[in-house]
Amino acid sequence: MDSILERIKNPSDLKKLSFEELILLSQEIREEIIRVVSKNGGHLSSNLGVVELTIALHLVFDAPRDKIIWDVGHQCYAHKLLTGRRERFDSLRQYEGLLGFPSREESEYDCYNTGHASTALSSALGMATARDLKGEKFEVVAVVGDGSLTGGVAFEALNNIGYLKKKLIIVLNDNEMSISPNVGALSGYLNYLVSGQFFRKYQRIVEGAIRDIPAIGEKLFKLTRKIEESIKKVLIPGALFEELGIKYMGPVRGHSIEMLVRALKDAKEYDGPVMVHVVTVKGKGYKPAMREPDKFHSAHPFDVKTGEFIKKSNTLTYTSIFGKTIVELAEKDEKIVAITAAMTDGTGLSEFSKRFPDRFFDVGIAEQHAVLFACGLALEGFKPVVAIYSTFLQRAYDQLFHDVALMKIPILFCMDRSGIVSGDGPTHQGIMDLAYLRPLPNVIVMAPKDENELRDMIYTGLRTNLPTFIRYPKGEAIGVPIKEISKIEIGKGEVLKEGSDLAIVAIGSRVYPSLKAGFRLEKEGISATVINARFVKPLDTHLLIETAKKFPLIVTVEEGISEGGFGSAVRELIGNYGIQTRIISLGIKDGVVPLGDSESLLRIYGLDEEGIFNCVMNNIAKIHEKRAILK
């Protein structure tokens, strides 16, 4: 017998099902999500929490005519299963497969790409405004996670939404708040009556009757309204949104399809901005994810029966090395404080948060605030360590320039997920950082070749008097034995291998593949010098200029965009000295890196050992031919 899920080709098929069948469908969707994520990895907890909500949204609204925007997009797995992508769901987060986020290129049901949080409210308001300007009729729904509301741009949007008063539905998916029965039930009941169709129908009758009372009717009516509003502000958690001009409904049980459908239908009737507060449970339907929702937020492949993650090896990750090192240093220096933007586990700061709770600050999804908060701490004598993913730090670029760099504030930025990142697609590829950091004045930018160098760079970065950035990749480190931590001389690279024919100058994660390529070239009779640059800013001017004078060919290698990145910096430096040597920059030529695993993508872009080797072999032959012609 076919499952119910197999009968769903598009959202209109949901309307043919009974509520009993919809409940069974919820279970099937959860089983499918668990099955695929256990193999491919992915965002499990959040997706298990929105299954009923997704079904209700597609029951009430007519996508793709009605616009449903997911924020953040890692809540969209059930949405993908219900919008014609079930047969491709096994390819989730795989190369050329389904993205783990909404993608306009992937489906007409995805009206907006959302990989970073807090963007949906602004874009939804733009769509609603465009709809009204064109005189069209459709609904615009923004499904916003409670964490997304911590982003500053979300508050900017709420302010504008309340001012413009456009017909717009905000679904607040709250999977963190614990609503106690004695307060939450009363609050939800009263608010449902105040905002529901029943109240709107009879409110006018009651108001009219009160106003008709001789002599005191109008005064009594005004007093009644004041009492009503006072009760709402005391008992109903949506008072803030009401004050902003946004109708508040809820809280609504997020795992009751019937209640969700009723609330969403009521919201459609309201001619203005309305927020439906939906309370869900992270990891719903899978006990390991319910017990440890953060652990399964962005899950690695795992055993479904036990909930245990499947480890590839015992090599420590760069993230864990960072976390251990910060704890080690903080034990000796009470001025060290750590800041993250809703990524305590992801950035490796969990142990720090437990050991030094008074010195740990999770500011929520608010990267701009995180940077400015660190500025204040640093100016008062503390040593802030700001741990943020590479792509997320892009959101605070003005603060990096206007506040950090111009004032030369000594903050250590530790940028996880730099370079190519497996599984999350274009929005999470940390390939822009070297290029966007290079133009900043008064900063130090470095990247470690292995775990020991990361430790040394953290130690060094806490002892500079300038803003310092360290970028490192997601995943396992090299596996070298851990040594005692030591300071690195600022702006000094190191020669790892001497050669006589050409030089390979690499940065960060591409150093070891370059070194392996260098040894492999020796077997082909080509002698390559291999240099670990360590620093993008400042460059080791003396080492690079002397290298350029010595060799007819220099190959730079970086795990980032080559335009404006490390290779560009080397080319500009050598060009300014008027040295005639050929420089080839190996990096990512196209700024959009697709979905895929990092190993495959590095191979595609020619940034693995094989690619570096082939690049040298092809170009050294051309140089020898040119030399022969000149002779």
Image (spheres, rainbow, N blue to C red):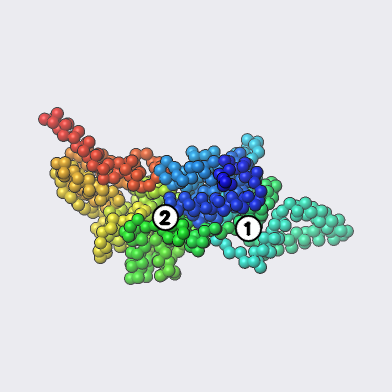
Instruction: State the image coordinates of residue 263 (x, y, percent, origin top left).
Output: 67, 52
Which amino acid type corresponds to the residue marked 2 in the rendered image?
A: His
Can residue 162 be seen here? The reply is no
Please tell me which of labels 1 and 2 falls first in the chain: 1
Label 1 SS: strand
- The answer, for residue 281, to whether it is visible in the render is yes
Check the image and report above or below for 187 versus 516.
below
Mark sitting on residue 300: 2
| Residue type (three-letter) at the residue carrying disc 1 | Arg
Q: Residue at x 11, y 30 (%)?
A: 631
Secondary element under disc 2, as helix, strand or loop, is loop
In front: 93, or 345? 93
Q: Which is more toward the observer, 597 or 237?
A: 597
Percent x, y for residue 18? 66, 48
In the rendering, at what x and y percent does residue 547 appear? 18, 45
Q: Residues within 10 Å of mark 2 (few under 14, many from 20)?
A: some
| Circle 1 residue | 253
Seen as rendered, the residue at the extreme left is 631
Observer-nearest of 553 and 515: 515
Q: CA distance from mark 1 to mark 2?
A: 30 Å
Point out the residue furthest to the front here: 1
Kindly identify which numbered label has been placed on residue 499: none
Q: Position of residue 168 (x, y in %)?
A: 63, 46
Q: How many marks?
A: 2
Q: Is residue 205 left or right of residue 423?
A: right
